[in-house]
Amino acid sequence: MPLALELAVQDPAGMRIAREAGAARVELTQALSLGGLTPSQATIELTREAAGESGPQVHALVRSRAGDFHYDDDEIALMVRDVRLALAAGAHGVVVGCQDADGTLNRDGLARLVDAAAGAPVTLHRVMDTTPDPVASLRIARDLGIGRVLTSGGASRAIDGLDVLRALVAEAAGDIDVMAGSGITASDVAAIAATGVDAVHFSAKRSVVSRGTVRMGSASDGVGGYEVTDRDAALAVVAALAPISA
């Protein structure tokens, strides 16, 4: 099977770049600088429109806040409802995750999120990279009927998690897709693809400096800024994979 590409985007403009790059899917989010948060329903609708009839699928990230993935009951309930709303707005699938206080995956919380998806494709996000044993986390995801895991192999960047990525591919044995992601660039994507993963996830983002002069929020850097999908960076990753896909 050819290697699938997934581009993390925040808006219809990012979707148009994903279409040009030949991506199979986009992970639609907002606030990429925070690791991604749940996009609005309008963002989902407009991004789905930008995809057209034959464009990439839209898989919406459902994450209620920044920070860790240990959520209380209210936060789980919010994400359950956001899963339903994202699918109602036109998302093809959702990207979710949650863990217990000891760092292991929260089976009950994940089961509720999978049930809310009502048969739509579900991806487990990089919460698995923060668990004590990513391979054990993959087994849990598979048992819950999750179809895909997004992982860096337990490292901050996927290029530094190659051994774990290989172990995950071996454990998956084709029963659940392993998608490598985090910090992937044109210079390292070939080595990551060589682990045997089913897909590669990348954001190809660049920062835009704010024109403001007043600091907005405790998390802002200086007077702040934002990130957008960079067309040239996205196409460079695709070009680096061309010899592998040929």
Image (spheres, rainbow, N blue to C red):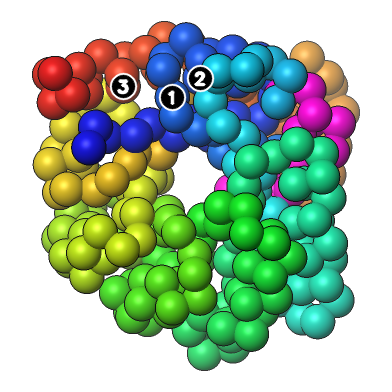
Image coords of residue 83 (percent x, y): 75, 56
Q: Quadrant of the C terminus?
A: top left
- The crowd level at tag 3 (other Cα within 10 Å; few <14, some 14-19, many 20+) is many
Image coords of residue 209 (percent x, y): 66, 19
Residue at image x 78%, y 22%?
46
Tell me whether the residue at label 2 lies in contact with that at label 1, contact meaning CB atoms closer than 8 angstroms.
yes
According to the picture, the residue beneath numbered tag 3 turns out to be 237
The mark that comes first in sequence, 3 or 1, is 1
According to the picture, the residue beneath numbered tag 1 turns out to be 23
SS under mark 3? helix
The mark lying in front, picked from 3 and 2, is 2
Q: Quadrant of the N terminus?
A: top left
Residue 42, magenta (yes or no): yes
The amino acid at mark 1 is Ala
Residue at image x 62%, y 47%?
93
Most common SS among magenta residues: helix
Residue at image x 45%, y 59%?
147
According to the picture, the residue beneath numbered tag 2 turns out to be 18
The mark that comes first in sequence, 3 or 2, is 2
Image coords of residue 79 (percent x, y): 77, 63
- Which range is magenta? 33-47
Position of residue 78 in the picture relative to residue 147 (left or right) = right
The amino acid at mark 2 is Ala
- Tell me which corner region of the image, top left, top right, bottom left or bottom right, holds residue 242: top left
The mark that comes first in sequence, 2 or 1, is 2
Tell me whether the residue at label 3 lies in contact with that at label 2, contact meaning CB atoms closer than 8 angstroms.
no
The amino acid at mark 3 is Val
Position of residue 212 in the picture relative to residue 186 (left or right) = right
SS under mark 1? loop
SS under mark 2? helix
